[in-house]
Structures are given as C-alpha cells and as structure tokens.
Amino acid sequence: MNHNNQLHQSTYGRELATDQNVEGVRPLGLLKDLERLQNYKALLAPLRFGGGIKGKITDSWSNYLPVITTPIGSEGMYYESSYDECTYTDINENAMYFNEKLCQKTEQNTENQQKIRKIYDMYSDENCDIDQMQNIINQAKFGGIGNNISIDDIVNSCEQIYNDQQLFERSVQNGIDTIYKRMSFLRNDIIFQKKVNEYNVNLEQRRQNNHLYNITWSETLKSLIVLLVAGLYQIYINSYGEQFSGKCPENIEACYFKNSYKKSKSYFIESAKNINANLLSFPVYNELDSTLSIDVAVILGKDSQDIQNLKGPVFIHTSGTHGVEGYVGAGIQLAFLEKIKQKKINIPKNVNIVLIHALNPFGFNFDRRFNENNVDLNRNFLKSQEQFDQLRLNEEQGAKYYKQFNQFFNSREAWVFPFSEIKFLFKAIKHLIFYKISDVKKALVTGQYNYEDGIYFGGFQQQNSTKIMIELLSEKLNLKNYEEPVVHIDVHSGLGEAGKDTFMYQFYQHEAIKSIFEQKPDEIFEYNTKNTELGRDYFLDTSSQAQFLNETQQNSDNTKTDVGQGYEEVRGSMDELFQLAGIKKGIQMTQEFGTMPNIYVLKSLIQENDSWFYGNQQQKIQGGVQLKSAFFIDSLEFKQNVLDRGLIAIQQVLQGLQNQKILEKIPDRTPYYN
C-alpha cells in the first residue's frame, strides 16, 4: 500500500473538526462536487449506531466506490442474491442439516471463520441457527467489506480493497447490484402497486376484520394519518420480502438458478455426467474470455446406437439464445437433469433428448443479450450470405421499420445516472405521442442489419453460434433428412406478465402444439403450480396466417397475443433452423416467460448497449446488472413458476412424442420453404 496516500475526513456540522498533527489525515468539510468524490478509492464508514439505508453508503456505490464499514453499517445494505454454493447433495438434505453445517463452519480454526464467530457472538445470544448464519453469508454480497469490528480490521480491509483489483471490482458490482435490485424505484414501485391492487380486492371485508383499523378510524385525524403511513410501510415491507425471498439453500427451487454463466455451465456438465448423458462442447472464440462454450447433453433413446445413429423421436431444448435470458432456460435444464437423476420425471425409452446449454455463452457470461459481435442470434438464421448482403446494402430493407427509431433505440453515448434516465423518459414520451406502442415494438423486434453498434442487430454474416447449431443438428446428430419427428423448445424471457409463459410459433404447427399442451402431465411429475395448463394462449405469426386462415377463423381460435404482437416480419429467427439443418419433420416453438414491464425492459436494453460501447468499466458492469434484472427476477415466486411451467412443458412434449395421434399431426418441413 502506498504510504503517500492520504485519508480525507469529511465532518458533520458547521465546525470543521481538525487535527493537523495527524500525518496523512486531511480534514475536509462538505464535498461540493461529485467529480471529487469519484476520484477516491473507497469510503470508510466505521458506524457504531444507526439503522436502515445509509445515504453515505448509497452515494458511494452510485459513484463506484466500495465501502469499508462495520456490521452496523452493512446491516440492511446488502443484496440477498441466491446462495449458489450448495451442491445437489446439499439440496436433498433437510434444513437441520444445513443448520448444523453452517454452525460447524464457524468452529473451524481459520482466521476467517474465527472472525465470523466473533461477529456472531457479538450480535446474538441465541444458539446457532440458519437465519442468523445466512445473514453472515450474505455479507459476501455487500459492496465492500462490511464486517469490521476493530481498528485493525478496518486497516486490513483498506489494504485489501486498495491492493486487490478483483475484490475492488467485485465490491463495486455488489454495491451497484444492491442499488438496482433492492432500491430501484421502477422495481419497487411495481411491487408496491401490485400489493396495493391485491389489497383493494375485498377491501371492505379486510377493513371489517382489522380491529386496529376500526379502533383508529374512530379517533382523531392524526391517528388516521399514522395508520395510513404504517399501513403503506407494512405493504411495502411485505412485498419487499416476497420479491427477494428466492434464496438457496432454504428454497430448493432457487438452487437450480445459478448466478453466473460459469456456475451454470459447471453444474450442467456435472449433472449430465451424473445420469451418463453424452456430452459435447463447442468453444465460442472471442477476445475477452477463452473458456466460453456451447455445451450439449444427449440422452439416447433405447433404440439409438450413438449420437450419430439416432432412432426414434427427438426432443431439443435450448437456453441462452439471448445470452442474459439464459438464467431462466438453464435453470429449467438443471432442474430437469436433477429430476431425471431422482426419477421424478417420466422419460420415454424411445425418445432422444438433446439439451443445449447457452447458445450465446458470451452474452450469458457478460450479462448481454447479444453475442461477442453484438449480434442478436435470433435474427441471424438467414438462408444465405446473399440475403445478409442484400439487407446490409439496402437500409430500406435491412432497417425497414427500425431506422425511424434508431436515435431512440441507440443514444450512442455513455449512460450517466440520473441524466440518461431523464433523457430516456423524455424520448419515450415524445415517441409515444407520435407513434403507437405497437409501432415502436414492431420496429424493435423486427430488428435491423445495418447498425452494428445498435440493439437487435442481425449481423453481416452467420455467427459461430449459428453455424454450430446448424452443424450440431445436421452433422453431429445426423438429423439431416431424418425421418422421425423432432420437437424443439427455445426458452426466452422478457415479454409478458411476470412468471407467465406464452408459446410463440408458426401457425402451420398449431394443431400439433395445441394437442401436446392439452395433455395432462404424468402424475409422476411433482409440481407446485395449481394450474397445469401450459401457455395462456398461442401466438399466430401473421406473416403466414393469410395462407391458412381468414380473419374470422383467426379470432375464433384465439391464437394471437400481445406478447407475439409485432413479430410479423421478423427475419432470421430460430424458426428457420430446421430448414437450414435439413430436418424434414418437426415443430419449433419459443417459450417466453414474462418479467418486467416493456418500458423497463426497453430502457435496460438501451442502457446496457450504450454502456457496453461507450461507457467505462463500472458503467458496463452497471449496465449488465440492470439488464439481468430486466430478464430474470430473483424471487422465489418467479423461480417456482419458471420451473413448474418449464418442466411441465417438457413432460407434455415427451408424452406427446409417444402418442400416435399427436405424431400424425406433426407437420413436414415448413410448407412455404419447399
């Protein structure tokens, strides 16, 4: 540590408490500008009293400073992310086992464990229990080092933060995580409004049952105000607890959702080996990380000799086509592999199962929706290089709807809080005055092939991941001209009501898909949801509906949704994969899980992309955190919904591949690509 560095002391009050005789300490008054604050390395806040949110700490995190403080300072100031260090063995044990395990950790003689025990002894007279130990574990998610007891601890923490670049960057990211995922206005406002709406149902009956309310109502206006404030506060606290209750190991469902690509990849490979699946790995080369890969687990049917000689129907399940959306799809895959190991899901003996983990590992790893070349893979499955060239050279075709919104979708400058948020809101209001929401959505999701630094960029040529996917199906699995039916589910997130799923597909597959999801799942499958009906409704692609339906038939079949609106002219989507791979018979569908409101998702996409291209390292991290929050809700309710409905969908597809009547409905290759 450089001994020429200085400790700057900022004091409260009008009087500037100074001690000019202390070497290396420079007393300051109130900092007059943010630029000066941003030049510091860390905030020291040795708090001995106080509670709740500490403004000095949030101000530091907002300006990318890690914080060194006491347990009092860090209390309530960490982000309760999933505790991902549990193994599958751990998952199957009961809560008492975890209680013992966590307590035993504190009895080891390492310096770190002694410190944890010291903290525990200071703040608890109770016997060791899991809730208190979990609070200690969660301190690892604090934006700095928040468990300092003595002056020596603080000095040592300063030295660690100063010398350890990885610790510094992780602390900065944890601080940003806490602000955006615990304190975000948009996020908490949505939760608050939802809870208010829930309480409005049977409101009079609720009032009659609330004796405290009846007593207070008869008192003074002042009492009424007190009740109102307390009630709103309680609603907020309740909703807050529900939103951030998805922790592992308390909730088994949370353990399947890993908090990083690399943890998810590691568990995927380990789980596939546990059931003796065939494993394939395809490196995806890029300049930032050489360890990224698309990993594939193949579970052979009883009649298949090997992966090159498959016999029987084939089911394919993909995650992470849109990078950061991989948290959702990969969670389903990990749960599915574990259910197979536990024999809690029925696997037909004649069906071959192909699980593809992280089609876009770069986006998954760096919390981006797009790949290493900023390409949206779900716009990259074009048939030929000539088609790419034609779209690139002709902006009227390549960005047909997109170009008039180009400046809105891509500000092309660093995202600076709060100015960029304000600018975004003004732009959004301006565009919504002159355009319908459906027009904006259509322009966005149709994509573009002209602005390589813009969102929803389809690319100038096929990407490595696209080529790998085509090669995997056509050559590695030898499915080109395959005679048996192939069913593919590609999992996405972002559109629709939080935790609810919608199936999107081309209409010629409708009868087969409808028949699959009308089946009741096998009773062997254990699920939590009360509603086993998969898909609220079905999406009919209007670019092809005219060939098969008139408007009356379309409406009567209820196959058009708000989620699917705007996709009529999308090019290069995964829907063309089977044609590119030469698969003769099969159905493809997207399972889309809703997360946040559309405006929040759009703002997050714009912020992350601008930060990636034009921001500094901290802004890039912040953009990734924001984007992840838009496509993956870290709550128990959301995770349970995703697992229940994701696993039920798989179960119903596997059942359908044994049903001869359903097999007969599975169409030959896309009729308009003969």
Image: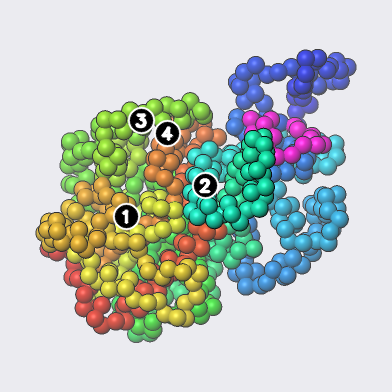
Residue sitting nearer the eye, 312 or 388:
312
Marks 4 & 2, CB-CB < 8 Å contact: no
For marks 2 and 3 on the same chain, the one whose residue lies earlier in the sequence: 2
Marks 2 and 3 close (CB-CB < 8 Å): no
Q: Residue at x 73, y 70 (%)?
A: 96
Query: What is the quadrant of the N terminus in the image?
Result: top right
Label 4 crowding class (10 Å Cα cut-off): few <14, some 14-19, many 20+?
A: many
Q: Could you say where residue 218 lies in the image, as x and y percent from the top left?
A: 65, 43
Of 14 and 234, which appears nearest the observer? 234
Residue placed furthest toward the right: 21
Numbered tag placed on residue 429 in the rendering: 3
Helix, strand or loop at label 3? It is helix
Q: The disc labelled 2 sits on which kind of residue?
A: Val
Q: Which mark is residue 559?
A: none
Give the magenta-colored segment's residue range: 44-59
As drawn, is 47 to the left or to the right of 524?
right
392 sits to left or right of 616? left
Q: Nearer the viewer, mark 1 or mark 3?
A: 3
Q: What residue is disc 2 on?
A: 196
* Viewer-side label of 1, 4: 4
Q: Is residue 525 visible?
A: yes
- Label located before the other in sequence (4 or 2): 2
Which of the numbered marks, if any, corresponds to residue 610?
4
The residue nearer to you, when weighing 565 against 39, is 565
Residue 242, position as x, y percentages in the image: 58, 54
Distance (Cα) linking label 2 and label 1: 45 Å
> Which residue is labeled 1 in the image?
466
